[in-house]
Structure formats: structure tokens, C-alpha cells
Image (cartoon, rainbow, N blue to C red):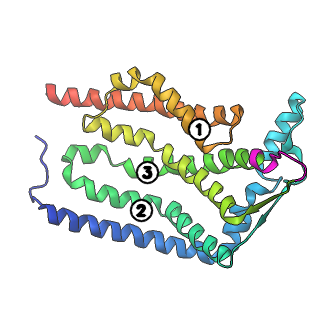
Amino acid sequence: MAQKQTHEMSFLDHLEDLRWHLIRATLAIVIAGSAAFIFSDFIFDTIIFGPKKMNFPTYEWLCRMSNFVGIDTTFCADEFPFRIQNRTMGGQFSAHIWTSIFAGFIISFPYVIYQFWKFISPGLHVNERKHSRGFIIISSLLFFIGVLFGYYVVTPLSINFLGTYNVSSEISNEIDISSYIALVRSSAIASGLIFELPIIIYFLTKIGLITPELLKKYRKFALVIVLILSAIITPPDIVSQIIVAIPILLLYQVSIYISKIVVKKQKKKKNV
């Protein structure tokens, strides 16, 4: 018979334990963020401003695809018709600090998840901990895949649409640095968190809040939510929304399959 930890912790003990896990996770983010702060040239010139350059891999691929099907597109332009500006005294320093913090969070994500796992694992049975050893690897992998998807798909589509959009020739686009970085940051991190959907469904199924039947029943509503979500994190054109919606729908379908496996294992335990 599976046994839990024999040592029972009080509510204050749990709070103290949580506090130390949060401190360790925060320290990891600060250390990784400090490294990102030092290597600012690479972070900004290569990563942050990479999607602004027309030699970015996504634009080159979309340009070749557009030429193949014979469609005129802005993906084959020489440069974007906008400039990035700083309009406040502390704008560049603030951008440097916050970009380093978010970069630190992305880099240290596996350790942050590890601290989260260390906090919840004592409450699991021995066999549950054994079958969940791959949690950190899988959740980190999904997060990094999501970040890459946001950076190489959502971000360039958004910049291409919004950066070339013009209601009048009398208006020139002078984009503030905070606005540009916020777009890159939100696209990457939001996509990374969205790709954690299978992990979230796994735990919600474990505690009985979600069932495969419930996920199937509300699949149509999930489709609407996905389209709304993709409309929020992408520019308002149909192609971009479809490109973003497809992987999210696939993740939802994978989540149903994961939920089925969890329920099946729980039923098997009850029958033993």
C-alpha cells in the first residue's frame, strides 16, 4: 500500500517551506537575469531586435513560400518602415532591467519548476512521485518549445503586420522601445505558458477537477476560447490567428489523451 510522508507539517510549516522555495526560485531568476544583463549586446542586438531585421529566418522562409505561390508580400521587403525610439530619460535603463529579469525567468524556468515540484511532492504518494519524475523535463521542454514558437512565429507575424500597417502616408511609425520589447516579451512568454496546458490538465485531472468527458463536452467552447486567445496574442489578421490556433488546438487534444491516461490509472488503483 502506498504511504505518504510520516512527518505531518502544520500550516505555518508549509508557509515557511513555501517561502524558502520562493526565495530559491527568485535567486535563480536574479542570477540568470544578472548574466543576461551583462550580455546585453547579444540579448538586444541578436535576440530582441532580431525579428525587426528582414534577414530573420521566419521572414526568409515566408518570402520564399510567397514567391513559390506567386503572392506579393511585405515579407520580402528590404527593411521595415518604422524606427524604434526611446522617449524617456530612463527608458533604455528600464528596458535593460526588465528585459534581463524576464530573460532570467526564461533561462531559470527548469529550476523554478523544480522548486515548485519540491514543494508539492511531499504531499504525493511514493508511487505518484515515481511516475512523475519526468515532470520537470516535460514541463520545461513544453515551455521552451512555446517560447520558441512565440519568438519565431507569433512575434515576426505581429511585427510584420503592425510595423507595416499605415492608415495614412502622413503618419510615420516611430515605435517606443518599451512598446516593441513588450510585444516580443509577451509573445514569447505567453506562448511558453500556453504550451504548459497538458501539464495543467494533468494536475487538474489528478485532483478530480477535470475529466476527459468534460474536456470533450466543452471542446466547442474551447475552440472559441482558443480563437479569442490567439486573437489577443497575434495581430488581427486571419492567417496569423490560424497559425497560432493550430498548435493550441493540438495541445488541447493531447490534454484530453493525458486526462484519459490519468483517469484510467486511477480506476486501476481502485480495482487493485
- Main secondary structure of the magenta stretch: loop
Packing grade of label 1 (10 A; few <14, some 14-19, many >=20) is many
Q: Going 27% across and 46% down the picture, which residue do you hit?
A: 130
Amino acid found under the numbered disc labelled 2: Tyr
How far is mark 3 from mark 1, CA to CA? 26 Å
**Element at label 3:** helix
Above or below, 154 against 71 in this view is: below
The quarter of the displayed image where residue 49 is located? bottom right
- Magenta segment range? 161-170
Amino acid found under the numbered disc labelled 1: Ser
Q: Position of residue 109 (x, y in %)?
A: 46, 59
Report the residue marked by disc 2. Answer: 111
Report the residue marked by disc 3. Answer: 137
Amino acid found under the numbered disc labelled 3: Ile
Q: Nearer the viewer, mark 1 or mark 2?
A: 1
Residue nearest the viewer, comparing 98 with 197: 98
The quarter of the displayed image where residue 175 is located? bottom right
Q: Is residue 133 left or right of residue 53?
A: left
Above or below, 211 against 77 in this view is: above
How far is mark 1 from mark 2, CA to CA? 29 Å
Q: Position of residue 259 (x, y in %)?
A: 35, 31
